[in-house]
Image (tube, grey):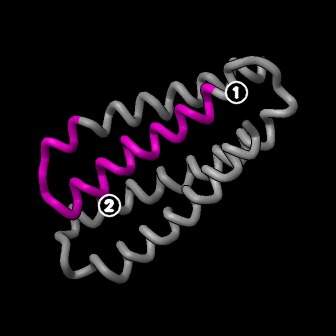
Amino acid sequence: MDRTFLLAGAVAGLLGVGFGAFGAHGLRGRLSPDMLAVFETGVRYHMYHALALLLTAALVPRLPGKAIAAAGWLFIAGIALFSGSLYLLAVTGVTALGAITPIGGVAFLAGWAALAVAAF
């Protein structure tokens, strides 16, 4: 499981940097300032949780139980749902995608809660 989350964190970090560069260089001037800010919020949370996945990978061997694995999977789900929906919202303008964003936010919160449970 630790290698799974290490790989997921590394790939998430790679994609986060790529999306950040794309937003800064490819989307500036093509999106409104508000939509660019939405995209940048997606990148920011994407990167925070890529790092959280790396932390989770490091802790899996040290913390027994299912909570640490749940934390990792919830961080992955949060990146996909929260950041992914913000990326799509910003580039497509389809506002219905904004309804998915809070689900990803709850996944992030649940991931941090699961990490706390694993530590306890």
Is 48 rendered above or below residue 119?
A: below
Disc 1 on helix, strand or loop? helix
Type of amino acid under label 1: Ile
Q: Which mark is residue 92?
A: none
Is 115 rendered above or below residue 39?
A: above
Residue 34, quarter of the rendered image: bottom left
**Percent coordinates x, y for residue 66 in the rendering:** 69, 19
Residue drawn at 44 percent across, 76 percent down? 21
Using residue 61 as the reference point, say whether residue 2 is left or right of it: left
Q: Secondary structure of the magenta portion, mostly? A: helix
Query: Which stretch is magenta?
Result: 70-99
Using residue 116 as the reference point, say whether residue 33 is left or right of it: left
Q: Nearer the viewer, mark 2 or mark 1?
A: 1
Disc 2 on helix, strand or loop? helix
The residues bearing labels 2 and 1 have C-alpha atoms spaced at a distance of 29 Å
For the residue pair 28 and 60, the one nearer the viewer reads as 60
**Percent coordinates x, y for residue 94 in the rendering:** 12, 51
16 inside magenta stretch: no
Residue drawn at 35 percent across, 72 percent down? 23
Type of amino acid under label 2: Phe
Residue, disc 1: 68
